[in-house]
Image (cartoon, rainbow, N blue to C red):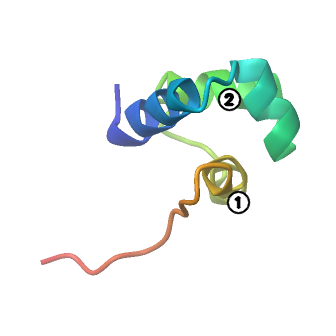
Amino acid sequence: MTTLATYVKTKRKEFGLTQEDVSMKSGVGLRFVRELEQGKETLRMDKVNQVLRLFGAELGPTDSK
């Protein structure tokens, strides 16, 4: 499982939300939430950010060192 997938799943559980709750509250499909939590490698960044905003986070570029 990827770090992003682990983060989303952990936060969802911390907030006491089901995958269906995350889907409805973030405005993405249930299938998207499931694929995100399963670590799918090709996901739309805008949709990922819709989910992450529920938890006060955002995905963006960083400098490699």
2 relative to 51 in the view: left or right: left
Where residue 10 sits: x, y (%)? 44, 29
Vertically, is 40 above or below 62? Answer: above
Residue furthest to the left in view is 65
Which structural element holds mark 1? Answer: helix
Q: Which residue is mark 1?
A: 46
Mark 1 to mark 2 CA distance (whole Å): 13 Å
- Quarter of the figure that contains the N terminus: top left
Cβ atoms at labels 1 and 2 below 8 Å apart: no
Instruction: Count residues near mark 1 (Cα–Cα under 10 Å), then give few for <14, some for 14-19, many for 20+.
Output: few
Lower sequence index among marks 1 and 2 = 2
Which structural element holds mark 2? Answer: helix
Q: Residue at x 74, y 32 (%)?
A: 22
The amino acid type of the residue labelled 2 equals Val
Where residue 61 sits: x, y (%)? 43, 74
Vertically, is 49 above or below 43? Answer: below
Q: Which residue is mark 2?
A: 33
The amino acid type of the residue labelled 1 equals Asp
